[in-house]
Amino acid sequence: MEAGKPVDSEKKHRLMVQQAYPATLDTPESEASSFVAGTVSQYACQRRTTLNNCNKKFTDAFEILAENYEFRENEVPCLAFMRAASVLKCLPFTIVRMGDLEGLPCLGGEIRNVIEEITEEGESSRAKDVLTDERYQSFKLFISVFGVGLKTSEKWYRMGFRILEEVKADKTLKLSRMQKAGFLYYEDLVSGVSKAEADAVSLIVKDAVRTFLPDALVTITGGFRRGKKIGHDVDFLITSPGLRQEEEVLHKVIDLWKKQGLLLYYDLVESTLEQAKLPSRKVDAFDHFQKCFAILKLHQQRVDTRSCDTSKESDKAEVKDWKAIRVDLVVSPFEQYAYALLGWTGSRQFERDLRRYATHERKMMLDNHALYDKTKRIFLKAKSEEEIFAHLGLDYLEPWERNA
Ligand code: CTP
Ligand code: MN
Ligand code: MN
C-alpha cells in the first residue's frame, strides 16, 4: 500500500500444485525425479554435495545459529545445526513447504521450527536476533583476526572490548606473534583469496619446492580443490616419491622466500609422525605432518587480472602493489599422500562424517595418515583417494562433491 503497487509475486504467495518438485527447479528433470529423500544418508560422505546450494536461505540461517552456539561453547546444538545445513546443501531442489522434509535425516526438533518459519516468513527471526547480538557481533570481529580463536575472543569480550579498534588501542595487551601479523595485514587477509590469486600463489609454491625437490608433487587442497571461487587461505600438500628427502624441503623453501622478501609471517611446525600411533579417535584432531602456516607477499603483477594497465609501474612508487595471502603448506610422506590429500581437501563437515562413518559403520579408524581395520587388525594401504573410498565401501566422491 505504501508503494502504491502490488507486491512482487514471491514463492511464498503461491499455492503449490501437487507435484514432486516445484516447477522453478533449475536442475534437469531426470536428476530431480530420480531423487528419493529416503535415500539421503546421515553421513556427508554418502551424499554428493556441490557448491550449487538450492537452500541457501535455510543454510545461511542454520550456520548463523550454529556459530552462535559455538561462540557460547554449546557443542551439541552447534553440530546439529551444522549437520542440518549440510543435509540441505545436497538437495537438488529448494524446500518450499514442510512436506518436502519427509524422509530427510538430521532435521528434527528445533531445526524444523526454523525451517517452518523461513518457509512461512521468508526469514528466521532467531537468526536475525543473533546477527544483532552484541556478543555474536564482537566474536565475529575478533575471530576475523588471524591467530584469534574462541579463547582470545572470550578474554577480550570479558575485558569489555567490543570492536577491534578498542583492542588495538590497549597497549598493555599481550598479543601473540600470529595476532600481531593478523592485525598488521588485517585488510588484505579479511578480503579473502580469489581463484586467480590462488593460482598465482600456486606457481610461486611449485617454483620454490621444485628448486629443491624436482620430482615433488605439489597439490592445491582445501576449498580451492573443491572448486570454490574464493577462500580464506590457499592450502598445499607436498610430497615426493624420493627417500624421505621431503623433510628438508620446507626449511629450504622458507629460507628462499625470506631472501626474496616474500615471507611476511610463518610458523613452522615440525612433524610428530614418530610419536603417532593408531589413527586418532578424535573427529577434529590435528595431524602429525610437518607444516607451515604462512603469510606470503603476492605481487599484484603476478596475478592475471586481465587488466592492461601495467604501463607506469615505476611512477607509482608509493602505491602498495602487493597483497598479503594466507598459505598453508603441509608435507606428507609419499606412502601417506592419499590419506593426507583426502584429509586436507575437506570440507570440515565432510571429514567429520567420513571419520564418524569409518568408526560406526565399518569399525575402522581413519585420520590424515592411515586407515586401520579394527576387526582385521591391519592398516589399509592406499595410493589414491579412490582406494580409500573403496576400503570404506563408499562410492567415490569427486572433490567438488565434498562441499558438505
Ligand atoms: N585441516 C586439517 N587439519 C588442520 C587444518 C585443516 O585436517 N589443522 C583440513 C580440514 O579438514 C579442512 C582442510 O584441511 O577441510 C582445509 O582447511 P581450511 O583451509 O581451514 O578450510 P577450507 O575448506 O580450505 O576453507 P577456506 O576456503 O575458508 O580456506
Ligand atoms: Mn583453505
Ligand atoms: Mn587452511
Image (tube, rainbow, N blue to C red):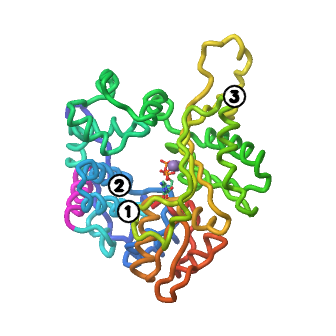
Q: Residues within 10 Å of mark 2 (few under 14, many from 20)?
A: many
Gap in angstroms between the C-alphas marked 2 and 1: 7 Å
Q: Do labels 3 and 2 touch, CB within 8 Å?
A: no
Q: How many marks?
A: 3
| Ligand 1 under 8 Å from disc 2 Cβ | no
Q: Secondary structure at mark 2?
A: helix
Q: Position of residue 362 (x, y in %)?
A: 45, 83
**Residue 81 in the figure: left or right of residue 385:** left
Assess whether residue 132 is covered by the magenta stretch: no
Q: Secondary structure at mark 3?
A: helix
Looking at the rendering, the stretch of residues picked out in magenta corresponds to 109-123
Kindly report which numbered mark, 3 or 2, lies closer to the viewer in this rendering: 3
* Marker disc for residue 352: none
Q: Which residue is mark 1?
A: 88
**Mark positioned earlier in the residue sequence (3 or 1):** 1
Foreground of the two, 314 or 230: 314
Closest to the observer, 198 or 356:
356
Q: Where is mark 2, residue-wise?
A: 59
> Does residue 181 appear left or right of residue 261 in this picture?
left
Residue at the farthest front position: 275
Q: What's the distance in space between the residues labelled 3 and 2, CA to CA?
A: 37 Å
Residue at (33%, 36%) from the top-left corner? 142
Instruction: Please say if the residues under marks 2 and 1 sit with CB atoms less than 8 Å apart.
Output: yes
Classify the position of the N terminus by image quarter.
top left
Q: Which residue is mark 3?
A: 301
Check disc 2 and give the amino acid type: Thr
Classify 277 as above or below 84.
below
